[in-house]
Image: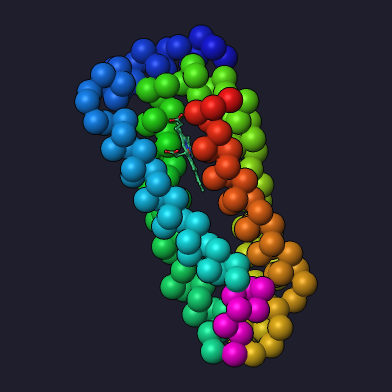
């Protein structure tokens, strides 16, 4: 694996990102903007699933507004994260936090799939004013915990 990380880091993209002034720090800023656009709307949607705003905001309206923003934020975070990874693949790839971050991202994906193909298919029955089903609340709680874990492990990449 280390050979692959070294090859990535010494690629022309890796060299360019590492040696051009301000590129890495700009990518970090873009990464954080992507995270804000992903985690902010995702947690706002999770809170709605947990009952916040139940009397005035249909779940489907919250989903239509918030989830495309979260998807855009995810695309920005993944793209900037991958470019940063290429430029420092040996250190980041060997960080103790890397497997945690990757695993938690996968758990987030599975949680989203289970929610959309499960509880959300019957959203017409609990769109507004009605308490959301336990399965939707579980998905929201898992989502809040998992995105918090991704942020913590992302931050720890630089320290472990
Ligand atoms: C495939 C997706 C991703 C990759 C490859 C990736 C990769 C990276 C890399 C290489 C760093 C820089 C580490 C350093 O400078 O030492 C980083 C930082 C970070 N990442 Fe990601 N990331 C991804 C997605 C995400 C997502 C979705 C989140 C949050 C929801 C996230 C949260 C963070 C945080 C909080 C930091 C620390 C930022 C800072 O302190 O400046 N990452 N990530």
Q: Residue at x 40, y 24 (%)?
A: 86
Which quarter shows the N terminus? top right
Q: Is residue 37 left or right of residue 53?
A: left
Whether residue 87 is visible to the viewer of this picture, yes or no, is yes
Does residue 37 sit above or below 56 in this rendering?
above
Front-lying residue, 87 or 97: 97
The secondary structure that most of the magenta stretch takes on is: loop
* Residue 139 screen position, x and y as percent: 69, 62
Quadrant for residue 82, please give it.
top left
Front-lying residue, 83 or 122: 83
* Residue 60 screen position, x and y as percent: 54, 78
Does residue 47 sit above or below 3 in this rendering?
below
Q: Is residue 62 left or right of residue 25?
A: right
Quadrant for residue 102, please give it.
top right
Residue furthest to the left in view is: 21
Q: Is residue 54 left or right of residue 134?
A: left
Is residue 52 one of those drawn in magenta? yes
Whether residue 109 is visible to the viewer of this picture, yes or no, is no
Which quarter shows the C terminus? top right
Q: Residue at x 40, y 17 (%)?
A: 9
Q: Which residues are magenta?
A: 48-55
Q: Residue at x 43, y 28 (%)?
A: 85
* Residue 26 screen position, x and y as percent: 28, 37
Does residue 107 sit above or below 26 in this rendering?
below
Does residue 74 sit above or below 135 in this rendering?
above
């Amino acid at each position: 694996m280390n050979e692959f990380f070294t090859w990535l880091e010494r690629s022309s993209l890796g060299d360019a990102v590492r040696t051009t002034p301000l590129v890495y720090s700009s990518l970090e800023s873009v990464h954080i903007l992507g995270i804000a656009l992903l985690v902010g709307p995702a947690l706002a949607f999770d809170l709605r699933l947990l009952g916040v705003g139940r009397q005035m905001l249909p779940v489907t309206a919250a989903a239509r507004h918030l989830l495309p923003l979260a998807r855009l934020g995810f695309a920005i975070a993944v793209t900037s994260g991958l470019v940063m990874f290429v430029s420092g693949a040996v250190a980041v790839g060997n960080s103790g936090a890397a497997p945690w971050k990757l695993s938690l991202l996968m758990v987030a994906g599975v949680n989203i799939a289970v929610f959309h193909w499960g509880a959300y298919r019957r959203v017409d029955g609990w769109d507004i004013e009605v308490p959301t089903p336990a399965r939707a609340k579980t998905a929201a709680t898992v989502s809040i915990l998992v995105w918090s874990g991704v942020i913590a492990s992302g931050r720890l990449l630089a320290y472990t």
